[in-house]
Amino acid sequence: MILLGLEHKITGVMHLGALSIIALHLFTGSIQQSYVIIASLFFIVKGIAFTLMKQNPLSLLDTVAGVYLMFPVLGIFSISLLNIIFIVFLAQKGLIYLLK
């Protein structure tokens, strides 16, 4: 019974870790682009997997956030307000997973 909820904690740590990599790159440029692309892909894959596994369409927002955050990382376009909105959204989801 000790492991009950451990998957939420692991998901929360991965969520916040990937988000930290993305945020540090977008705001300071201190993380290599290849790491940031992998972190964005984490949200895309996680969103698709959780949507299919849990039948929860809200998990699809992780995919949308991952795809959107890929644009500023690749230098295609960046809207600061949207960057912040997606980062805050993903941060609160990560904290919820961690505290669950």
Image (cartoon, grey):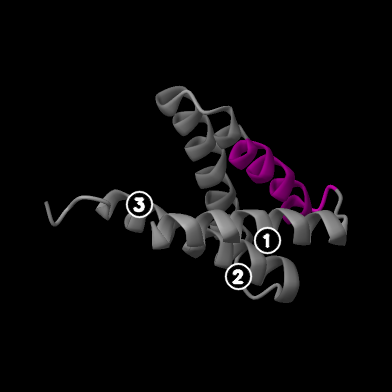
Amino acid at the residue labelled 3:
His
User: Which range is magenta?
Assistant: 61-76
N-terminal-most mark, 1 or 2: 2
Query: Residue 66, relative to residue 28: is it above or below?
Result: above
The image quadrant of residue 23 is bottom right
Q: Is residue 89 magenta?
A: no
> Closer to the camera, 88 or 79?
88
Residue at label 3? 8
Q: Are marks 2 and 3 in contact (CB under 8 Å)?
A: no
Q: Residue at x 86, y 59 (%)?
A: 81
Residue at label 2? 31
Crowd around label 3: few <14 · some 14–19 · many ≥20 (10 Å) = some
Q: Is residue 10 visible?
A: yes
Amino acid at the residue labelled 2:
Ile
Residue 83 position in % (x across, y down): 77, 57
Residue 35 position in % (x across, y down): 54, 59
